[in-house]
Image (cartoon, rainbow, N blue to C red):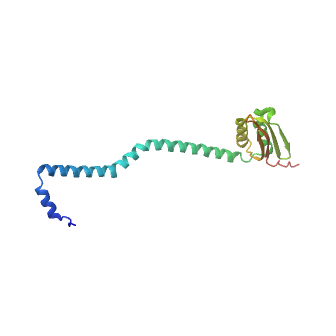
Amino acid sequence: MSAPLDTSAWLQLWQRASRREQRLTLLATALVVVSLLWWLGVAPAWRTLRAAPKQQLALQAQLSQMRQLQAQAKDLRAQAGMGFDEAHDALVQTLRPLGDSAPMTLQAERVTVTLKQVAPAALAQLLADARQNARLKPTEAHLKRDALGRWDGTLVFQLPPARATSS
């Protein structure tokens, strides 16, 4: 094994090389240094700079969605104090588009909705509207899907307690 060349040996090797070899060596060294600077310093920053507008648009969309959710949450908190009559009326309004395919019966604070051949989209809309407008979620659901994909069964909702009237 040979020992590494010391500085004086490198200097002698350099002086023995022709001018053309010296220039090509300097050019190759410069090319390697510039390439390393590009790959390690400039290219990552360049990629980040190029990706920034897309990321900014995505973050702005996400911020907008978060603000909408915040406003919706504030609205829900403001309406959280819905009483028996308001919740009942809102549920009646929610069921109105389904007509005879979703009659409801009221027993104390418990509402049972009987579904008869309700389309999946209509059922999804009913559940979303009940949650949004009446602030109600089903406490029980007994559903069966028929061969045509429509839903039959019952949904049970629990209304808020009726306020006692003072005399």
| Residue farthest toward the front in the current orientation of the protein | 1
Give the vertical position of 18 relative to 150 (above or below). below
Placement of the N terminus among the 4 image quadrants: bottom left
Q: Residue 75 at what x, y percent from top left? A: 66, 44
Residue 24 in the figure: left or right of residue 74? left
Which residue corresponds to the image point at 82% horizontal and 44% vertical from the top-left?
111
Which residue corresponds to the image point at 72% horizontal and 43% vertical from the top-left?
131
Which residue corresponds to the image point at 72% horizontal and 47% vertical from the top-left?
80
Q: Residue 141 at what x, y percent from top left? A: 77, 45
Nearest the viewer among 9 and 158 is 9
Residue 128 in the figure: left or right of residue 45? right
Q: How many marks?
A: 0
Q: Residue 165 at what x, y percent from top left? A: 86, 48
Give the vertical position of 4 relative to 117 (above or below). below
Q: Residue 134 at what x, y percent from top left? A: 74, 42
Which residue corresponds to the image point at 77% horizontal and 33% vertical from the top-left?
98
| Residue farthest toward the right in the current orientation of the protein | 167
Q: Quadrant of residue 151?
A: top right
Nearest the viewer among 118 and 78 is 118
